[in-house]
Amino acid sequence: MNGDQAHYPPVEPFGAGFRGRCPRCGEGQLFDGYISLKPRCTVCGLDYDFADSADGPAVFVMLIIGFIVVGLALWLEVSYGPPLWVHFLLWVPLVLILCLPTLRWLKGIMIALQYSNKAAEGRLDKPK
């Protein structure tokens, strides 16, 4: 990422990440499958070796979607007191429907933000 000498107009990282596009040119595909990255952009040739979102997207998905679903499940339980099978019937599909696309979107956004902010792995300065 440090050796990027190409000149491209700035790409809005949230839009590119949400659409799963290259963070440099905004045109090439970022993903090769559901959440696995391609080795490089097919349009501008950007090497995706810098991209390491780690567990960040999964943690955000668990926190955000978990907060929503647990809040709704508690509201339903306190308000109506349905049997346990109703909870399984409602919340398991809702969790899958909400988590699967959100994981891909957040991973794309985090990688695009890494590129636009030139984020890199931390390094210790060597004493002189």
Image (tube, rainbow, N blue to C red):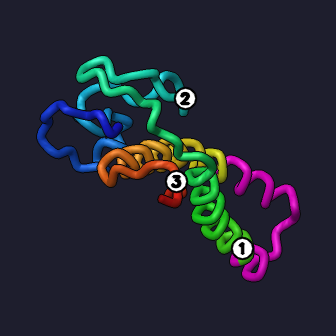
Crowd around label 1: few <14 · some 14–19 · many ≥20 (10 Å): some
Q: Nearer the viewer, mark 2 or mark 3?
A: 3
Is residue 92 depicted above or below 33 in this figure?
A: below
Cα–Cα gap, marks 1 and 2: 37 Å
Q: Tell me the kind of residue under disc 3.
A: Arg
Q: Nearer the viewer, residue 50 or 78?
A: 50
Q: Position of residue 30 (x, y in %)?
A: 39, 30
Cα–Cα gap, marks 2 and 3: 26 Å
Is residue 81 depicted above or below 111 in this figure?
A: below
Q: Tell me the kind of residue under disc 1.
A: Leu
User: Does the segment drawn in magenta span residue 119?
Assistant: no
User: Does the segment drawn in magenta span residue 78?
Assistant: yes
For the residues bearing labels 1 and 2, Cβ distance under 8 angstroms:
no
Q: Which residues are magenta?
A: 75-94
Quadrant location of the N terminus in the rendered image: top left
Q: Nearer the viewer, mark 1 or mark 3?
A: 3
Please tell me whether the stretch drawn in magenta is mainly helix, strand or loop. helix
Q: Position of residue 114 (x, y in %)?
A: 40, 49
Residue under the image location 63 percent in, 57 percent down: 59
Crowd around label 2: few <14 · some 14–19 · many ≥20 (10 Å): few
| Residue identified by numbered label 1 | 76
- Asked if residue 113 lies left or right of residue 49, the reply is left
| Residue identified by numbered label 2 | 36
For the residues bearing labels 2 and 3, Cβ distance under 8 angstroms:
no
Residue under the image location 43 percent in, 44 percent down: 111
